[in-house]
Image (cartoon, rainbow, N blue to C red):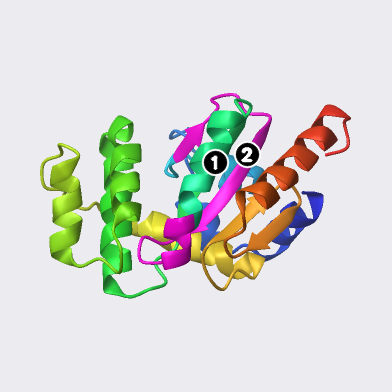
């Protein structure tokens, strides 16, 4: 994990730092604190999260609603947090697969901003569609979970832009990609492999080696 944090600290741009700045306004005599790499990855309030509130281990999932491998892998992340109550997952949407990747991601991010309790239902619905999305399928998913039509916010775009910059810094070129402790795991893996990696990181944390 220290290696990942060093990479972020050295390479992340001032734009990312500015976009993830979540501190309240302070007098000019007190410069606002910049977010740390750990906060950018794991604690950005603009980034969706599910699982344990006070997790011992937080995974970071870089994913895309148009990615067929993400659609296969995402349910495994949901399963891992159900079976491991000390694990959480942060969702970094990466719109790599065309305009509808961007549209679906912005809709989901806007729901997270405005009605976070509805995010997971929409996330699951968007992931459940076979094949790529279009505007009609995105609107249908929004309606199916009981939401009014979503007017995407400027903040949703900035969050996605930040996610892309973070992915570039970390050398992530496709989805899914998952940060598990001190490793970046490219592609979809089996549940057995996922659980093995999670258990190994939890053991490190338990033994004070993380």
Q: Quadrant of residue 201?
A: top right
Vertical side of 168 occupied by 75: above or below: above
Q: Secondary structure at mark 1?
A: strand
Residue at 30%, 49% in the rendered image: 108
What separation in Å lies between label 2 and label 1 (alpha carbons)? 6 Å
Position of 150 compared to 161: left or right? left
Viewer-side residue, 89 vs 4: 89
Residue at 27%, 34% in the rendered image: 115
Q: Position of residue 199 (x, y in %)?
A: 75, 38
Q: Is residue 100 visible?
A: yes
Binning the other alpha carbons within 10 Å of mark 2 as few (below 14), some (14 to 19) or many (20 upward) gives many
Residue at 40%, 59% in the rendered image: 160
Asked if the residues shown at circle 2 and circle 1 are in contact, with their CB atoms under 8 angstroms apart, the answer is yes
Q: Position of residue 194 (x, y in %)?
A: 66, 49
Name the residue that disc number 2 marks.
58
Residue at 41%, 62% in the rendered image: 64
Q: Position of residue 23 (x, y in %)?
A: 49, 36
Position of 122 compared to 89: left or right? left
Q: Quadrant of residue 86?
A: top right
Q: Quadrant of the C terminus?
A: top right
Instruction: Tell me, yes or no, whether the highlighted magenta stretch contains residue 184.
Output: no
Q: Which mark is residue 187?
A: none
Which stretch is magenta? 49-72
Q: Secondary structure at mark 2?
A: strand
Position of 20 compared to 2: left or right? left
Q: Is residue 35 visible?
A: no
Q: Which mark is residue 89?
A: 1
Viewer-side residue, 132 vs 105: 132
Q: Position of residue 121 (x, y in %)?
A: 30, 39
């Amino acid at each position: 994990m220290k290696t990942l944090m060093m990479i972020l600290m050295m390479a992340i741009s001032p734009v990312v730092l500015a976009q993830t700045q979540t501190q309240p306004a302070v007098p000019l005599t007190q410069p606002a604190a910049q977010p740390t790499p750990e906060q950018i990855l794991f604690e950005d309030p603009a980034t969706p999260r599910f699982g344990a509130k006070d997790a011992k281990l937080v995974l970071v999932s870089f994913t895309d609603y148009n990615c067929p491998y993400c659609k296969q892998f995402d349910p495994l992340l949901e399963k891992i947090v159900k079976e491991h109550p000390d694990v959480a997952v942060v969702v970094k949407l990466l719109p790599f697969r065309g305009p509808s990747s961007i549209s679906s991601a912005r809709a989901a991010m806007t729901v997270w901003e405005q009605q976070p309790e509805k995010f997971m239902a929409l996330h699951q619905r968007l992931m459940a569609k076979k094949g790529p999305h279009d505007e009609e399928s995105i609107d249908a998913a929004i309606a199916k979970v009981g939401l009014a039509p979503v007017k995407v916010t400027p903040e949703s775009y900035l969050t996605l832009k930040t996610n892309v910059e973070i992915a570039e810094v970390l050398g992530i070129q496709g989805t899914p990609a998952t940060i598990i402790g001190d490793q970046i795991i490219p592609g979809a893996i089996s549940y057995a492999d996922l659980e093995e990696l999670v258990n190994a990181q939890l053991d490190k944390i338990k033994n004070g080696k993380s």
